[in-house]
Image (tube, grey):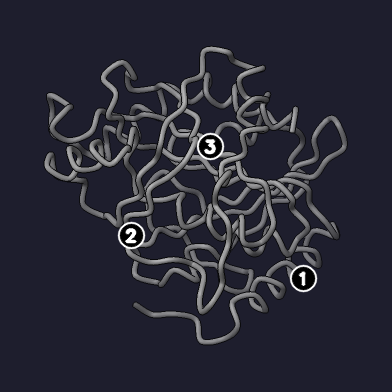
């Protein structure tokens, strides 16, 4: 994989400086990565005061996945807080290296964010979770065989997905379930055997993002909140073949409801 040769933390600081220069905003409070199905939440959080082409900032690339935007937005909430919406997510399977995958997270931290909200569309292993069901992430299984941390960098991940923030989410919607998210590398979907394996080792949700970003966010000192949208039942559980079109369709159908939910949660953070 191609990796950025320079210091990834300096690159994040450079991106944050460019962000501040282009927006005139010195610091942000909360960052959001909006995955498949979650994009409409940005419109409900507050007033978008600046929209940037992410590719104009150091270290960022245009998105390679249908359904993802290539923008970074600065939003002013009714409470006067600043939210940074990262629409330019890079997935590990794109081959740009793990530093690039977590560059947005590190940029958010360098921009002052103390909370990282990570969302995704994923496959569900619980047949009670119909497509369109939001599920809080309580923990994860990193099945990518890599880490965003390099060298002797030891970080405690005991409460990686903040129990405090999950409690806030359940104040908004007490019916929310939670589960363990397993990140596979992708871009192929998991085989039925891999899904059975993931279930046996404790997974409730499977996807291709989030875990690496969460680790980088914790390392950067941010409090992490994760929530998945079940867009389909996983392979071997679903009665039909999996497709990205199905993911997009489920996200569009659930979009208004889950976006309102996420906006209310962010408003309480």
Residue 174 pos. (x, y %): 58, 13
Instruction: Kindly state the secondary structure of the residue where label 3 is placed.
Output: loop
Q: What is the quadrant of the N terminus in the image?
A: bottom left
Q: Residue at x 49, y 55 (%)?
A: 89
Instruction: Identify whether 93 is placed above or below 149.
Output: above
Mark 1 Cα-neighbour bin, 10 Å: few <14, some 14–19, many ≥20: many
* Apparent side of residue 154 relative to residue 79 in the rendered image (left or right): left
Residue 27 pos. (x, y %): 83, 56
Residue 236, quarter of picture: top left
- The Cα–Cα distance between marks 3 and 1, rounded to whole angstroms, is 25 Å
Q: Which numbered circle lies on residue 140? A: none
Q: What is the quadrant of the C terminus in the image?
A: top right
Instruction: Identify whether 185 is placed above or below 44.
Output: below
Q: Which numbered circle lies on residue 17? A: 1
Instruction: Kindly state the secondary structure of the residue where label 2 is placed.
Output: loop
Residue 184 pos. (x, y %): 30, 52
- The Cα–Cα distance between marks 1 and 2, rounded to whole angstroms, is 31 Å
Q: Earlier in the sequence, mark 3 or mark 2?
A: 3
C-beta proximity under 8 Å, tags 3 and 2 = no
Task: Name the residue tied to disc 2.
Answer: 144
* Apparent side of residue 112 relative to residue 205 in the rendered image (left or right): right
Q: Residue at x 56, y 67 (%)?
A: 154
- The Cα–Cα distance between marks 3 and 2, rounded to whole angstroms, is 25 Å
Q: Earlier in the sequence, mark 1 or mark 2?
A: 1
Instruction: Identify whether 49 is placed above or below 138.
Output: below
Q: Nearer the viewer, mark 1 or mark 2?
A: 2
Mark 3 Cα-neighbour bin, 10 Å: few <14, some 14–19, many ≥20: many
Q: Residue at x 43, y 45 (%)?
A: 140
Task: Name the residue tied to disc 3.
Answer: 39
C-beta proximity under 8 Å, tags 1 and 2 = no
């Amino acid at each position: 994989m191609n990796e950025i040769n320079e210091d990834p933390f300096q690159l994040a600081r450079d991106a944050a400086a460019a962000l501040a220069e282009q927006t005139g905003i010195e610091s942000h409070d909360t960052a959001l990565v909006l995955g498949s199905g979650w994009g409409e939440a940005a419109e409900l959080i507050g007033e978008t005061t600046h929209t940037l082409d992410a590719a104009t900032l150091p270290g960022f690339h245009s998105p390679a996945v249908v359904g993802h935007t290539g923008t970074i937005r600065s939003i002013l909430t009714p409470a006067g807080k600043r939210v940074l919406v990262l629409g330019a997510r890079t997935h590990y399977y794109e081959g740009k290296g793990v530093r690039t995958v977590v560059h947005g997270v590190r940029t958010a931290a360098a921009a002052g964010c103390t909370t990282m909200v990570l969302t995704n569309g994923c496959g569900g292993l619980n047949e009670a979770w119909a497509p369109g069901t939001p599920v809080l992430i309580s923990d994860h299984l990193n099945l990518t065989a890599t880490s965003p941390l390099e060298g002797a960098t030891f970080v405690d991940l005991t409460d990686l997905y903040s129990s405090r923030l999950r409690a806030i989410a359940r104040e908004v919607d007490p019916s929310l379930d939670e589960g363990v998210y397993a990140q596979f590398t992708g871009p192929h979907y998991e085989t039925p055997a891999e899904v059975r394996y993931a279930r046996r080792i404790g997974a409730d949700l499977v996807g291709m993002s989030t875990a690496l970003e969460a680790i980088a966010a914790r390392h950067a000192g941010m409090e992490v909140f994760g929530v998945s949208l079940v867009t389909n039942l996983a392979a071997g559980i679903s009665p039909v073949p999996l497709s990205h079109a199905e993911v997009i369709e489920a996200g569009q159908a659930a979009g208004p409801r889950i976006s309102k939910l996420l906006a209310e949660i962010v408003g309480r953070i």
